[in-house]
Amino acid sequence: MKATTTPVQIRVAQRSPPMVAQFHELINALEADEHVRVVVFDSAVDGYFLNHADFDAGLEDLTAMPPGPTGLQQWPDFLVRLTRAPVVSIALIRGRATGNGSEITLACDMSFASREKAIISQWEVGVGMVAGGGPMARLPQLIGRNRALEVLLSSEDIRSDQAEAYGYVNRALPDAELDASVDALATRIAGFDKWAIANTKRLVNTSLPPDVELGAGWDACIASLGRPAAQERIKALLARGFHKPGDVENRLGYYIGQLAD
Amino acid sequence: MKATTTPVQIRVAQRSPPMVAQFHELINALEADEHVRVVVFDSAVDGYFLNHADFDAGLEDLTAMPPGPTGLQQWPDFLVRLTRAPVVSIALIRGRATGNGSEITLACDMSFASREKAIISQWEVGVGMVAGGGPMARLPQLIGRNRALEVLLSSEDIRSDQAEAYGYVNRALPDAELDASVDALATRIAGFDKWAIANTKRLVNTSLPPDVELGAGWDACIASLGRPAAQERIKALLARGFHKPGDVENRLGYYIGQLAD
Amino acid sequence: MKATTTPVQIRVAQRSPPMVAQFHELINALEADEHVRVVVFDSAVDGYFLNHADFDAGLEDLTAMPPGPTGLQQWPDFLVRLTRAPVVSIALIRGRATGNGSEITLACDMSFASREKAIISQWEVGVGMVAGGGPMARLPQLIGRNRALEVLLSSEDIRSDQAEAYGYVNRALPDAELDASVDALATRIAGFDKWAIANTKRLVNTSLPPDVELGAGWDACIASLGRPAAQERIKALLARGFHKPGDVENRLGYYIGQLAD
């Protein structure tokens, strides 16, 4: 991360305790930095923006982490602080953004998706879980309650044209133009006055639901992980090849539909 | 209604005291059932999803009914409970959804409309009424205040393409694909875990305005029905053929525009 | 303004202390009138709907004006009262609607834009300012937080197709059809009952954020105008030809991008 007005690119992989810790280093730095005005999140992994949580990590590894400064657990703490930070955050989505990837998109101030290569989804209900990073709090305001419920309850893969039509992302752009378009926008905003940016964002954020809603979602997520319904479905998915590169990850929405009881 | 995971199809006709009583039997059963996960509302009447209230029924018949468990009168009580029920509700709209038909659509969790055959509207202001089933509370969050006011104040018939563009329905689908698409979605969700569905919906519902807003709308509706402005306009419409199959019902938006004083 | 049911057309130019005073005469009259049901705002100046504030007027001229009846300063006071007035307001946008022009659009109940000739924007952040007329309070509910932040933080010119896709305006219409379409809609609503209109609008307005949010935005705007960041950028724009007819006004989004530090 460069402490300049140049947009900063953050490359992310998969949520796990070490990743969550890295995100906290990042947000601590962003909150303290007096110069950075724009951060762009994109992915270093071909085919993925950021996918679901790491199920090899024990549940205890996540729940044992101390709460963050907001009083929320680490993952929602990071998301809430990103949303409220006095710096502009942009998600550049190429490849799959499932679960955590969608949640970080919703925590950012803006998002732009590859028309050909982006897929976004909240897959949790399909495996007996409740999402832990705030989509129940964020999506209804962004795309309306009815489309939010469709996204969450269908647990279906959503292509970027549909995501754009719903307002789930700001815009879908041709893949060949995506990087240049986001760079141009980030560079433009990085040339503006930080005080004006931060105060405008602060006033827009008055529209946000209270942060405790993300805490309630996190609690429901942890509770869901302890139930047989989720454990059995995740086990069944793992047996089919989930959690490693391959068809189950690539067509997760389809395979979730095969788990139905 | 089958107490299984199979989606349940509810076929409705026109709001009247008996219909409202049937909806209450339905919602009582849905709230008590531990297995039903998805209900689909569609229509048994060709050309109509669900139309405006029954104006042959005396106003007293409606207002004499005791309030429901929410403390609201019967119609808003049913709508609020459907919205908050731990079961997924889907409106499948083929034909006209005016007034009550739009209100039940807005109370459902999702809605899908026939591209060729669906028309949706809130016609009340055009006949001097205020809508009684919550669109003033529901539409601004779903489609934004400005489009909500256009829908409500124009009292115009809205084709499904426009309804989809505004987010009034989740999606408009080709008529030939509508049933199969909704069946597939309902069956998919019906295979998911009920606890995960119910808790996800509960958290999304935090975004709802307080239920008393539907009570305020109902009160304004009843007050409007007692005013000469509404009585004269409804009488004028009846004289032109309203309230029976025919051109006035089919092109209600047009005929309302002819009533202007 | 005609005190009839005929829609009233208001033609506006540029915000300045005299203009703000005229708007207050207008809103005083609208609130008191028992008959007017619809007002249409359009522009008498070719190429502009309503542009940014008058920077020749001293800041003191604006801040010295006494607050209005809402307790807010004159400009947000007018906007809030227009939004809450028991009369329907429609913005007919042909040409540029920047800053104040966008703010009056957001204060109206509906807006329709020329597909070929409308441009809408909030340019303030691009010149180191915070917008003073409520877009931070209004845009998130209308187009979602993420698109609201894109509009505000990019300070970019937005064509009407994009504005329609985002829900920033109700609809973009072919320029040749715009006047007739708005006239038809205004005339239709002007034939409806005023009580039903006013009560429906009152209930929709329950969804509005508290008016004090516009006061907070106004305060931030005034604070921004006193900072060197804004003063230097506005001075640089003036040196390039801003504030008089010409290329800087016509392509304001482009020229703002040239100011980056």
Image: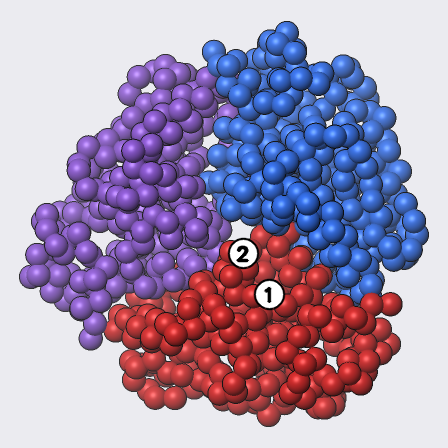
Chain colours: A red, B blue, C purple
Mark 1 surroundings: few (<14), some (14-19) or many (≥20) residues within 10 A: many
In this orientation, does residue C38 appear?
no
**Amino acid residing under circle 1:** Ile
Label 2 with label 1: CB-CB less than 8 Å: yes
The residue under label 1 is: A158
The residue under label 2 is: A166
Q: Nearer the viewer, residue A88 or B5?
A: B5
Residue drawn at (53%, 21%), measured in percent from left and top? B254
Residue A5 position by quadrant: bottom left
Secondary structure, mark 2, is helix
Q: Nearer the viewer, residue B138 or A126?
A: A126
Percent across and percent down for residue C184 are 40, 24
Of tags 2 and 1, the one toward the viewer is: 1
Residue A257 position by quadrant: bottom right
In the figure, B22 relative to C156: above or below?
above
Percent across and percent down for residue C237 are 13, 61
Alpha-carbon span between mark 2 and mark 1 = 10 Å
**Amino acid residing under circle 2:** Tyr
Residue drawn at (34%, 64%), measured in percent from left and top? C153
Q: Chain of mark 2?
A: A
Q: Chain of mark 1?
A: A
Quadrant where the C terminus of chain A sits is: bottom right
As drawn, is B60 to the left or to the right of A38?
right
